[in-house]
Image (cartoon, rainbow, N blue to C red):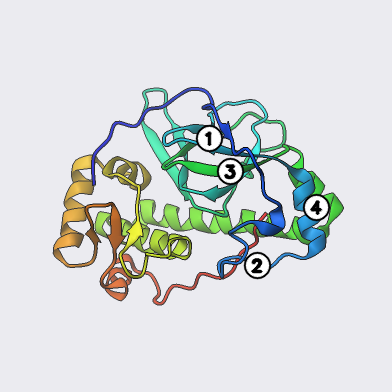
Amino acid sequence: MSIDAPARPHRPSNARPTGTAIDCADCPLRPLDAFQACTDAELSVIEGIKQAELRYETGAILIAEGADDPPLFTLREGWAFRFKTLPDGRRQILSILLPGDFIGLQQKMSDAAAHGVQTLTPVLVCRFRRDAVWRLHQELPSLGYDVTWLAAHENALLDENLLSLGQRTALERLAALLLLLHARAAPHDPLADTEGLLFPLTQRHLSDALGLSLVHTHRTLRSLRDRGLYALQGDGRLALPDPPGLARIAKLRWPLVVGRRPLI
């Protein structure tokens, strides 16, 4: 893993339209086992609130901290993260965003963005109107329930992160992060089980997510590697040779249960 100095733009980055948008019914995420099926009526409503499909490059700001009335997105391809910064530039990564995640739900309607969202890789997003959440609740209660489920799921992930920051040791934090991210991301990477998971996080990202210094992060990674619990290939693919062993260190129940979730 490299150590980068992450840029912190102060405004959203430019996006490129995809040119030809696909129908929501043809979304390549929908056939995956990670997601629940949608009815024709639900797909019609989702299609009605979708504004555009946009591409952003690595390091782009999807939502800037303090932005007025930021849009909503579904991440269709690539990785991103939510973050908050202090005036002196220190950054806390709040959560890692993966394909299928609904972005911007944490903001109140018409309020300034309380956190930023930045891309880890090139991404493709579906952008929705800011009033999309209201329309989902009003037009089809089942989709309103899905939004509530997504909000609860995000809170559960944040609870796990808070547990790590407050109680887990550095070794336990890193083991939990690697294991949970692998479980969430593997369904989107057909090579994850055979060649490893394409893993774009650097040591800087890991330290900002775990509340550790770069030096401590580096030493902790080396300790896990020396125990044979993770390997990072030259092409940036992460392999976990002993997931149960990693779960024991992280104090996580094994096997992990990752159920199907809604896709807006």
Residue holding disc 1: 115
* Type of the residue with mark 4: Val
Decide which of tag 2 and tag 1 comes sooner along the chain.
2
- Label for residue 45? 4
Check disc 4 and report its element: helix, strand or loop: helix
Give the Cα separation between the discs numbered 4 and 3: 18 Å
Point out residue 38 in the picture as x, y percentages from the top left corner: 72, 64
Is disc 4 in contact with disc 1, using a CB cutoff of under 8 Å?
Answer: no
Question: Could you say which disc has been placed on residue 58 in the image?
Answer: none
Query: Which residue is under mark 2?
Result: 36
Numbered label attached to residue 125: 3
Question: What x and y, as percent, mark residue 218?
Answer: 19, 47
Q: Residues within 10 Å of mark 1 (few under 14, many from 20)?
A: many
> Which of the 4 image quarters holds residue 120?
top left
Q: Amino acid at mark 3?
A: Val
**Callout 4: 10 Å neighbours few (<14), some, many (20+)?**
some
